[in-house]
Image (tube, rainbow, N blue to C red):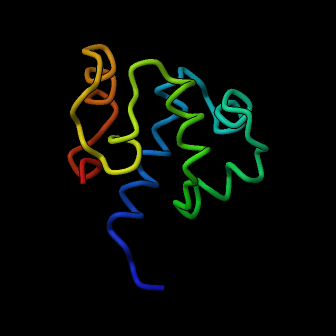
Amino acid sequence: MPHDPEIAALKQRLDLLPELMDFDHHTQVAAAIGVPYEAWSHTVRTGDLSIPTAKKIVKAIPGLNLDWLAFGHKNGFTVQMAQKIARLQTPDDEA
């Protein structure tokens, strides 16, 4: 399968979620958003993020928005969320 930079960037953002939620592992993210771990693990591995799951994530993380989650757009954050994401992302992650 050809490399899709948009999917790769989405997967990088999904990988930041445990830290954004002050968790240690994706199992905790899955539990917090109410998604079975097997389904969540598939989402993180493949970048196949459904709209219902994206909405659950945004509801579970105050200050996060769908624009960043889905597309990487950095507008509309709370100041605290913008600072937290900036600390977690490396320049390569910002695509």
Q: Left or right? Give the position of 86 relative to 56.
A: left
Q: Nearer the viewer, residue 37 or 48?
A: 48
Q: How many marks?
A: 0
Residue depicted at 61% across the width and 45% down the height = 52
Q: Left or right? Give the position of 73 relative to 35.
A: left
Residue depicted at 76% across the width and 45% down the height = 37
Q: Left or right? Give the position of 16 relative to 68.
A: right
Q: Nearer the viewer, residue 17 or 88?
A: 17
Q: Is residue 49 above or below residue 68?
A: below
| Quadrant the C terminus occupies | bottom left
Residue depicted at 61% across the width and 55% down the height = 43
Q: Nearer the viewer, residue 80 or 27?
A: 80
Q: Is residue 3 above or below residue 12?
A: below
**Image quadrant assignment for residue 77:** top left
Residue located farthest toward the top when viewing the structure as drawn: 80
**Image quadrant assignment for residue 9:** bottom left
Tell me residue 38's x, y (percent): 77, 52
Tell me residue 47's x, y (percent): 52, 60
Tell me residue 49's x, y (percent): 55, 54
Residue located farthest toward the bottom when viewing the structure as drawn: 1
Residue depicted at 39% across the width and 77% down the height = 3
Q: Nearer the viewer, residue 94 or 90?
A: 94
